Image: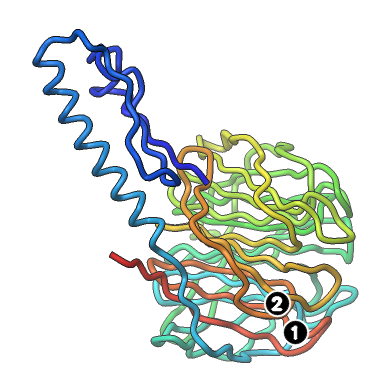
Amino acid sequence: MKTEVRVTALCSSRSLNVAKETSFNREQGAIASRLNPIVPIAQRALYRVCLVALLAVAAVLNSQASCQVVWSGSQYQYDYGFNPKVAIAGSTVVEVHNGGSSGLVPLWYRVGQLNNSTIQWGNSIEYESLGYNPSVSVYGSTAVEVHNGANGLGPLWYRVGVVNSSNNTIQWGNSVRYVLQGFNPTVAVSGSTVIEAHNGAAGVGPLHYRVGTVNLWTKTIQWGSDYIYDNGFNPSLAVSGSTVVEVHNGGNGGVVPLWYRVGQLSGLTVGWGNSVSYGSGFNPAVADGSWLVEVHNEGFGGLSGIWQSFGATYGTQIDWFNWGDFDYGMNPSVALGSSSVVEVHNGANGVGPLWYRYGLIECIA
C-alpha cells in the first residue's frame, strides 16, 4: 500500500523552481526529490522549510499506520432475531433487526448506552409490524430507519425518530414510502442531511442513491432525485461531514470482489470517485468518522469468519492500514464513535442469537 503526499501550493515546483517532485512513500520510508541545481539561495531556504513540513506530514501518516481497532476479548448476546444493523451517536447505540428470516416480519429496535466495554441495553421494542432488511443511522438525537416493504424487490419505506437516551426509547414518526421498486436499502445521516442507497434489482444490478433533508419537527424527509452510481449488490453507506463512503458486493451467490467508492456531498447530489476493489468476501458494512472501519464475512451462505479493515479516507480513496479476522458469525454491521467501535452480527445461519462486540481505536506513539 502506498500513500503519497505532494507539496503542491507554496512548495510546488512552479513557485520554487526547485523541487520538481517531492513525495513520501510509506513502504520505502524515504523522501525522494529531484532538485534544480541552479536556484537562488532564498528558494533553497524555502525548499528546506517545505521539506521539513513534508517530513511532519510523513510522521502523521506513520502514526496513522500505527493505529488499529483493539477488540474486547468477549462478545455478548443481546437479542434474538436476524440481519441486525447498528449506529452510534456519542455514547448512545441504536440497533434494528428482523424478527424473522423469511417473508415480511416484525421489525425491532433497541437503544443502549456504552459503559466501558459493554452496552447497557434498554428493552427490545417492535416498531414496524411487517418489513424486511432494516437499516438505521443516528446523528445526535435524530434517527432515520429504512427497510423493504416486500420480501424481495418492492417498495422501500423510511421512518424518522427522536432518540431519548434517558429511557432508551425512540419516538418514531409514520412509516413513509419513498421508492416504488428497490431492495437492500442502507442509510446514513449527517446533520439534517440523509443519504440512502439501494439495489435497483433483486440481484446484482444497478445501485441507486438519493440525498434528502430531514425535518425533525414533522419527522419527514424531503428527497432529491434518484441517481444510479454503480453496479453491484448489497450496498452499505457511511457519512462523516460531507464525505460519503459506500461499499458493496461485486456479485452474488458466492465469495466475490468487494468494492468501495468515496464521494463528496454537494447539495442533493454526491460527486463520486472511482469504484475501487479492496478485497473479497460477502456482506460488507462500513462506518466512517475520524477513522474508517469496514467489516464483512469471509465466506458465503452461512456462518464464517468476520473480517475487519481499518483505514482513513484521503480525497476519493481509502488508505487501508490493517485488516484481519476477529469474530465468527453472519451479516455483520459496524458503527463508529469518536474512538469506540461496535459490531453486531447473527450467531446462527437464520433466526437466532444476536451478538455484539466492542472495540477501541488505539494508536501507538
Which amino acid type is shown beneath numbered disc 2? His
Q: Quadrant of the C terminus?
A: bottom left
Q: Nearer the viewer, residue 178 or 8?
A: 8
Which residue is rendered at x = 46% and y = 62% of the image? Answer: 139
Q: Is residue 219 left or right of residue 58?
A: right
Residue 50, position as x, y percentages in the image: 21, 30
Q: Is residue 134 left or right of residue 251?
A: left
Q: Quadrant of residue 355?
A: bottom right
Tag 2 residue:
97
Determine crowd level at label 1: few under 14, some 14-19, many 20+ residues with C-alpha closer than 10 A. many
Which amino acid type is shown beneath numbered disc 1? Gly
Question: Does 269 sit above or below residue 60?
Answer: above
Q: Is residue 318 left or right of residue 299?
A: left
Which residue is rendered at x = 78% and y = 49% of the image? Answer: 250
Tag 1 residue:
81
Between discs 1 and 2, the one toward the N terminus: 1
Task: Give the number of callouts.
Answer: 2
Question: Which secondary structure, mark 1?
Answer: strand
Residue 12, position as x, y percentages in the image: 29, 20
